[in-house]
Amino acid sequence: MSLFDPFDLHGLALPNRMVMAPMTRTRASDDHVPGPMMAEYYSQRASAGLIVSECTEISTQTHGILRAPGLYRDDQVAGWRKVTDSVHAAGGRIYAQIWHCGRISHPDLLGGALPVAPSAVKAEGEIFLPSGIKAPFPTPRALELKEIPPIIEAFGAATRRARQAGFDGVELHGAFGYLPDQFLQDGTNHRTDGYGGNVHNRARFMMEVIDEMISAWEPARLGVKLSPSNRFYGAFCSNAYETYAHVIQALVAEKVGYIHLMEPSAADLKTGTVQIEHVVQSFRPLIPGVVIANGGFDKARAEAVLVSGQANLVSFGVPYVANPDLVERFRRDAPLNTPDPATFYSEGPHGYTDYPSLAA
């Protein structure tokens, strides 16, 4: 089995098994509308078997990143339609990753309101503000029970808008310590109602979101990204395997189209806090369907995980930032462009659409 073999993703024909991972790039407008530069960026990378978009806001309550795109207004749908049309015209396929940041925000991004979370547990780290400075995360406000259903409904509405915008499917961002993950992990969820306590209750929010998304699109067109071994923003779980095994089995029962699993990074492993060192290997026996492996893969490691049967597809992040023609470079064993981290989260085309292809 090779990275360059085709794959049938529930009727969506992928020409290879390389996925462009979702990556925040902060190139939408200040009012969260995708523009022509984003259409160019994604269409440049259309040779990927599948593109998964950067995390995309489902409501105004979800502002956690400067210039992140949204899917809650008609003008955003129109902007994304230009992106998906460009990708399809270039022969590609693209899913939208939809997202609620939860506590990973700040009142300066939310019109003065506090970020919301399952519980009033402060995140670790700092956040970039519109003023250009970084500030510590505030202690979030715990969601009241009556506030949860409208958030779940917003995920369904964003899924419908993704269909209108011409995406081929939708991925739920259930990873990285954002809202669904905050509900799932007992380090961030101290609730005593039906959304907290045992693992079934902590998984309830994510599964109700999935049910709402299924009401908007068939389950085969839905994916979910999980990061069982990562402690992003200080999120943690006392028993990671039990927690994520439970939610993975529930997702399998819902027949979602794929599960996107992130391996721990080298930095994670150095902390000594990683409970699951080999994520895909650990959870693959629970998943009869499609697995996308993610996290620090190069060509050799990606080929190995495919040959082992532990994954069907492999997603690449930073390599796709700097190499719009990553498929062809891997195919030829050609040198890769060097990424410029200073431009990862900046503005304008530099470090975004100006990386050269082999042909150039």
Image (cartoon, rainbow, N blue to C red):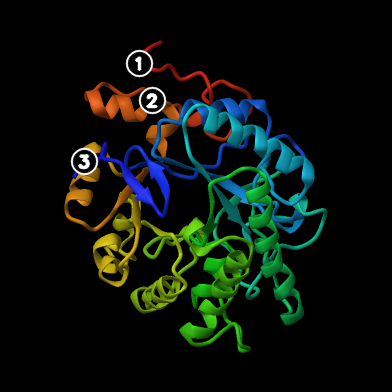
- Of the 4 image quadrants, the one containing the N terminus is top left
On the image, numbered disc 1 is attached to which residue? 358
2 or 1: tag closer to the N-terminus: 2
Q: Which mark is residue 2?
A: 3
- Dot 1 crowding, Cα within 10 Å, few <14, some 14–19, many 20+: some
As measured in the structure, the alpha-carbon distance from the residue carrying label 2 to the one carrying label 3 is: 17 Å
Seen at 69% across and 47% down, the residue is 70
Q: Report the side of 58 relative to 250 (left or right).
A: right
Indicate the secondary structure of the residue bearing disc 1: loop
Q: Amino acid at mark 2?
A: Asp
Q: Amino acid at mark 3?
A: Ser
- Residue 212: percent from the left, percent from the top? 63, 69
- Residue 20: percent from the left, percent from the top? 42, 40
Q: Is residue 184 visible?
A: yes
Q: Which mark is residue 140?
A: none
Callouts 2 and 3 close, C-beta under 8 Å: no
Q: Report the side of 173 relative to 323 (left or right).
A: right
Callouts 2 and 1 close, C-beta under 8 Å: yes
Indicate the secondary structure of the residue bearing disc 3: loop
On the image, numbered disc 2 is attached to which residue? 325
Seen at 74% across and 50% down, the residue is 109
Callouts 3 and 1 close, C-beta under 8 Å: no
Seen at 29% across and 43% down, the residue is 297
Seen at 61% across and 87% down, the residue is 194
As measured in the structure, the alpha-carbon distance from the residue carrying label 3 to the one carrying label 1 is: 21 Å
Indicate the secondary structure of the residue bearing disc 2: loop
The residue sitting at the right extreme is: 111
Foreground mark, 2 or 3, reads 3
Q: Is residue 32 visible?
A: no
3 or 1: tag closer to the N-terminus: 3
Image: 177 above or below 199: above
